[in-house]
Image (tube, helix red, strand yellow):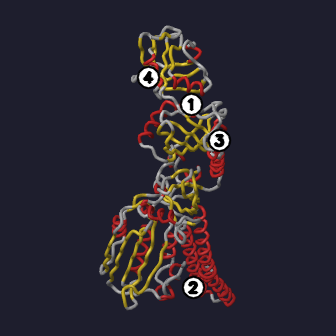
Amino acid sequence: MEHNQVGTVCSPALQWVTDQLTQGVLVLDEAQVCYLNAPLREWLASLGIPVGPGHSRADFISALSEPDSQGNVQLSLAGAPNLCLTARMGEQAGQQVLLMALPQAAPRQGWADPMLAAAPVGLLLVDDGGHILQANPAIETMFGFEAGSLTGQLIEVLLPERYRNGHAGMRTMYSVQPEARRMGVGRELFGRRADGSEFPLEIGLAPVQTPSGQGVLASVVDISERRKIEHSFRDLVQAAPYGVLVVSQDGCIRFLNHLVAQAFGYRTDELLGQAVEILIPERHVAGHPPLRTAYSRAPRHHRMGMGRDLMGRHRDGSEFPVEVGLAPLVWDGQQMVMAVVTDISARKRVEDSLRQANAHLEQFTYVASHDLRSPLQGIGDLAEWMQEDLQAGEYDKLGNNLERIRSRVARMGRVIDDLLTYARAGKASTELVLVDPQALLDNILEMSPIPEGFVLERDIRVSPFPGARTPLETVLRNLISNAIKHHDRSQGHLRLRVTEEDAYCCFRLADDGPGIPEASLERIFMLFQTASASARQGSGIGLAITRRLVESHGGRIEVHTGVAGEGRGAEFRFWWPRFQQRVQTGSTQ
């Protein structure tokens, strides 16, 4: 039997057995190192830590944790403060016996493969216990460690402290199913430098065989500069005077600026991670994913919806016109789409207003030069005749001419009243209610019953929708009344059909009357105009007001003739919005 310096008994046979192990064996008492087997002594010597039996425990071990439920402890060596070892601990006769896996010591002369040592990316070789076997110079520079100082340390030394506790479990999971892959896909990864500072990085993993068994080769890239560029891009996009969306190929919103969120009535955080279809009118949602797929197969700079009116869906369900430009973009290493979205509500209103103003100005010019000028000229002629009658002493003619003057003045008054009515028809109503076309028609027929001999057939296939009820009722009443008034027979048949067409309700009112001459199809919508002089039974303002009401509420109207065959019949068609249209002030119409 051989006694060491502190009286620990160790037979030569037991010492020989422990020296054959690949693990390190360490025996301690409360004050001193009692025994180290040969593998442990050689490994410590490779690290420049000479120690043997009788060495002060406090000078050798700086920290020793309490054992966990499986008897595992963590210990740190005073000669290598950044080195942390895991050991299985037991107690025997007042002494602590520790059995630990030893990391493979790297040669002091540097990285084993000169090509890998010269690699511009950081490379780490780690054993299955999480100990760093080798670290190339790029890694040491990246993390701020001295050459060779990372060898033997646990990989967790390169992680921020908040991630260290859970990392051992992740290592274990990887060892069960090792594969070459990118680490932390979808998450931001950070490293911790020797001075405690943190920086973003990307890590690739690949299983390899090491002298001590299965290991992992990790490639590490510092992406700090890339992150700075991305942050600068984000700041630039946030400052852009138009809305910007970044959308992944699966349709998920990955980034947006505050302008696009504001335009659609959301906060930025409420849209992040949502499907882009949340911003599209419901009737188009089902058909949008195939369009996204088609674009992803052939991405290009592209203006969306050429030749069509694009609409966006506000949070409150209302819609507004938009322009959308698309461009392919690589974001966080993935192929995505950047969409530039512009709310063109104000521009659309200005364009519509200018177009209507030009048309109305043209009509007003005609009225001023004809319908107002003619009575004035007639009054002037009558005044001259009255002057001649007075000079001739023919007083009996004065009364007749005065009556004719009063008639022309009254006519001018009616024209001016009609002009005011026409002007008021150009103001869109902002009072929205739920409009039921069936109930609307019932109300019209109750107030203005169909004359005997006439029949109105209805075919209404739309659900109630939000809209301006009174203007729509006025339009429909004018068209029904016009069809009956201008019919040339005592009996007639009218047919009203209402269907949904995209964002509109399409109203079609057909009759079997005399029809409208082709030359008059556009003229009938002008002020004080009718289909023919012989048909002039009214003021000629009803259809002009009808068109203005339709257009001022975002619709359009047209007329077709000869629909009943043999040149007879006319059909008026008008499209009325069935969804709220948002205006720039925040109200809807």
Q: Are marks 1 and 2 in contact (CB under 8 Å)?
A: no
Q: Residues within 10 Å of mark 1 (few under 14, many from 20)?
A: many
Say whether residue 164 is left or right of residue 437.
Answer: right
Disc assigned to residue 17: 4
Q: Is residue 162 visible?
A: yes
Residue lying at the far right of the rendered structure: 391
Nearer the observer: mark 1 or 3; the answer is 1
Q: Earlier in the sequence, mark 2 or mark 3?
A: 3
Q: Position of residue 178 (x, y in %)?
A: 45, 43
Left-right relation of 168 to 191: left
Please identify the quarter of the rendering in which residue 444 is found: bottom left
**Marks 4 and 3, how far apart at CA:** 41 Å
Which is closer to the viewer, label 4 or label 3? 4
Instruction: Name the residue carrying label 3.
Output: 138
Q: Nearer the viewer, residue 397 or 210?
A: 210
- Give the side of residue 411 with respect to residue 472, left or right: right
Viewer-side label of 4, 2 = 4
Query: In front: mark 1 or mark 2?
Result: 1
Residue located beneath label 1 in the image: 152
Q: Nearer the viewer, mark 2 or mark 3?
A: 3
Q: What residue type is disc 1 on?
A: Gly
Q: Position of residue 371 (x, y in %)?
A: 59, 81
Mark 3, Cα crowd under 10 Å, few <14 / some 14-19 / many 20+, is many
The reply to whether the C-beta atoms of the residues labelled 1 and 3 are less than 8 Å apart is no
- Assess whether mark 2 and mark 4 are in contact (beta carbons under 8 angstroms): no
Q: Secondary structure at mark 3?
A: helix
Secondary structure under tag 2 reads: helix
Amino acid tagged 3: Ala
